[in-house]
Amino acid sequence: MPVAILVINVVGAFVLGALLEALARRGPDEGRRRVVRLAVGTGFCGGFTTYSTLAVATADLLRAGAAPVALGYAIGSVLLGAVAAWAGVLVGSRS
């Protein structure tokens, strides 16, 4: 199971959740906040996370005949990412 991909995606989801919540609490999405959101959120987090690699890794597991592992990996990655984003929102709301 590609654990590194899972960890990267979960960390990226957390950072994105924290960033977006912190920016939203500081005011409307304009000016410097928009630039930060686009540069860090879309740019850094988009480049850091590897959800397309998650799809390839899942397909590789399926081709290897490990369908239950592939299904658990794909669903688990998405669920852990959602939980991490939620935790990031909680952290971002405190800043």
Image (cartoon, grey):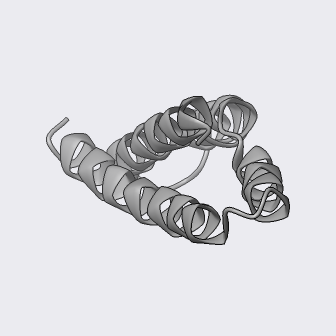
**Residue 17: x, y in percent?**
41, 49
Placement of the N terminus among the 4 image quadrants: top right
Q: Residue at x 62, y 44 (%)?
A: 34
**Residue 12: x, y in percent?**
52, 38
Vertical comparison of 59 with 49: above or below: below
Q: Residue at x 66, y 35 (%)?
A: 35
Q: Is residue 20 left or right of residue 71?
A: left
Q: Residue at x 65, y 38 (%)?
A: 49
Placement of the C terminus among the 4 image quadrants: top left
Q: Residue at x 55, y 33 (%)?
A: 8
**Residue 37: x, y in percent?**
59, 41
Vertical comparison of 8 with 27: above or below: above
Frontmost residue, 81 versus 44: 81
Q: Is residue 35 left or right of residue 92?
A: right
Q: Quadrant of residue 41?
A: top right
Frontmost residue, 84 versus 53: 53
Residue 25 visible in image? no
**Residue 43: x, y in percent?**
73, 34
Frontmost residue, 30 versus 18: 18
